[in-house]
Image (spheres, grey):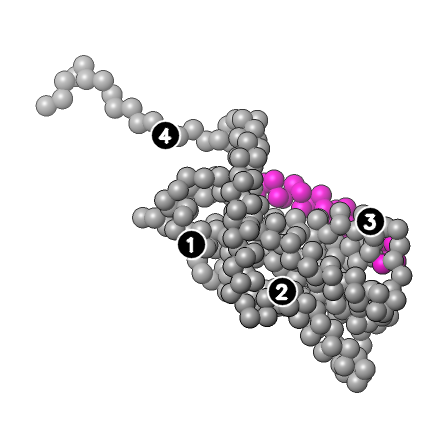
Amino acid sequence: MHSKHQLPEVIHTPESSLKHPLRLLQQMWRDLLASRELAWRLMVRDISAQYRQSFLGIAWAFLPPIVMAASFTLAKGAQVINVGVTDIPYPAYVMFSTALWQTFVEALNGPVQAVTVAKPMLARVNFPREALILAKLGEVFFNFGIKTILIVALFIFFRVSVSWTVIIAPVALIHLVLLGTFIGILLAPFGVLYQDVSKGLSLITGFWLFLTPVVYAVPNEGTFGYLVKLNPVTPLLVTTRELATTGVVSEPLGFWVVSAITIIGLLMTWIAFRLAMPFVVERVSS
């Protein structure tokens, strides 16, 4: 029997971090700095495993661009495809563009793979989740550094002249990597819960490749040309390629619009990732 003077039961619920945005941003920055050492260790471990467990090792960074360039150069020579006019020799164009596309796809898949592989660790150890993303970002840039050896070699072989703007091409490349990371972080919590995300990404990026001017020049007319220009990867990849070669940027407005959306989107998805992961970990461990 309850006394009528009994105190009412009070249930305390955790206060949302979004109510204190400044405090949340400060905590995010602190966690990002705190995760650097762990990110470095994870990156070294993953890169070592990637090349140690492979017979061809470092050659895998070179093979896809070379195979793609050889295939499409033969198809172009046989007039099977019409690729349009490219600013640099076609084999160099395809190899360089494929290396850039691969880097984007690695940045896109990285967060999903990192969080999925770390699923057992997430349930047992409390650590800044940002370390997983930073480690994958480091791996993406390391792999591109290896691809740069191939790019420099083929530029010398095909006598591709470069503009002084090649020194700022890495800025555009970083924007391309951040776009992939932004989409990857958005999908990462779903990737932990559903295997369909990883499988679906393989299908989507396969189709996405053909909407990106990797093996053909940017089309200017028709429905296909319109779709290629709507593709957010197009201005970032094309600008990186143009800064590294001709120095003439054809779509500066598109580049800055996509870059602005990427940076704002990356911040928003980072916040969403932090808020979602505790619930995801709880569901995985239950």
**Which tag, 2 or 1, sits closer to the chain's start?**
2
Determine the image quadrant of residue 79: bottom right
Q: Quadrant of residue 264?
A: top right
Q: Name the foreground residue: 222 vs 108.
A: 108
State the separation of the CA atoms marked 2 and 3: 26 Å
Q: Residue at x 89, y 61 (%)?
A: 161
Give the image location of residue 226, x and y in percent. 76, 62
Which kind of residue does numbered mark 3 sit on? Ile
Which mark sits nearer the N-terminus, 4 or 3? 4
Q: Which residue carries the number 2 mark? A: 58
Q: Which residue is mark 4?
A: 13
Q: Main secondary structure of the magenta part?
A: helix
Residue 24, label in figure: none
Query: Which residue is rendered at x = 50% and y = 28% of the image?
Result: 19
Q: Give left or right: position of 109 versus 82.
A: left
Badge 3 marks a residue whose secondary structure is: helix
Classify 10 Å Cα crowding around label 2: few (below 14), some (14-19), many (20 and above): some
Asked if residue 212 can be seen in this view, the reply is: no
Q: Tag 2: residue type?
A: Ile
| Circle nearer the N terminus (1, 3) | 3
Q: Quadrant of the N terminus?
A: top left
Report the amino acid beneath label 1.
Leu
Q: Nearer the viewer, residue 17 or 140?
A: 140
Identify which amino acid the numbered label 4 is placed on: Thr
Disc 1 packing (10 Å; few <14; some 14–19; many ≥20):
some
